[in-house]
Image (tube, grey):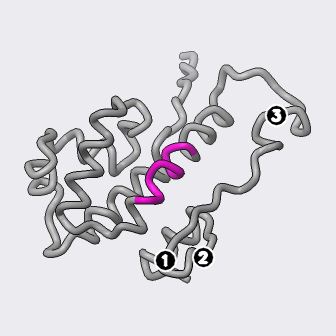
Amino acid sequence: MAQRSVRRRPREAIISGYLLKLIRESVQPPVSQERLAELLRVERNTLQGWESGRRPLTSTQAGTLLRLQARLRVLGADPMLLAALPGAMEADHLLADLMADDREETPLDEHPLSRIPPMRMRVGRRGASMTIGQVIRRRSGRR
């Protein structure tokens, strides 16, 4: 019996999904996925899909994302984590492109990512410059 080859689609939202989970956990008082889904007016399965990376936030309409961010802000989510969300989504998009099975082989020095500086953002009262990874590690308690 011949084995079927299964093409696996790269998970497109690992970074933004994990960040969304941290954002949910930063809401005070803490809320469950089910409760947050109610507050955000989305299905629980949708929120689970976003947090797990199964359903990329990059596929969500811009207006919907803006409303979600506004509701999370009102619920008291960590502003630093909310500010990192667009960059996390961009990182997911770029990673998915790199991991796609059907993309052409491009020499590293010609790849569009070779010209992009590391994504940094201004955070905190003093406007310190940090990468998205540094923001996530700091907020999740990992140093």
Locate residue 61: give its quadrant.
Answer: top left
Q: Earlier in the sequence, mark 3 or mark 2?
A: 3
Residue underneath mark 1: 124
108 to the left or right of 79: right
Q: Is residue 84 left or right of residue 67?
A: right
Q: Nearer the viewer, residue 11 or 111?
A: 111
Q: Are marks 2 and 1 in contact (CB under 8 Å)?
A: yes
Looking at the image, is mark 3 or mark 1 earlier in the sequence?
A: 3
The residue pinned by badge 2 equals 128
Cα separation between marks 3 and 2? 30 Å
- Provide residue 40's location: percent of width, then percent of height: 16, 47
Q: Please identify, in this view, whether the residue under mark 3 or under mark 1 is nearer the observer.
A: 1
Check disc 3 and give the amino acid type: His
Question: In this picture, which residue range is highlighted in magenta?
Answer: 83-90
Q: Secondary structure at mark 3?
A: loop
Q: Mark 1 Cα within 10 Å, few/some/many (few <14, many 20+)?
A: few
Residue 1 position, x and y percent, is: 54, 16
Q: Residue at 28% of width from left, 71% of height from top?
A: 26
Residue named by callout 3: 111
Instruction: Give the main secondary structure, helix, strand or loop, of the magenta stretch.
Output: helix
Image location (x, y in percent) of residue 104: 77, 21
* Mark 3 or 2, closer to the camera: 2
Q: Is residue 85 magenta?
A: yes
Residue nearest the viewer, comparing 67 with 36: 67
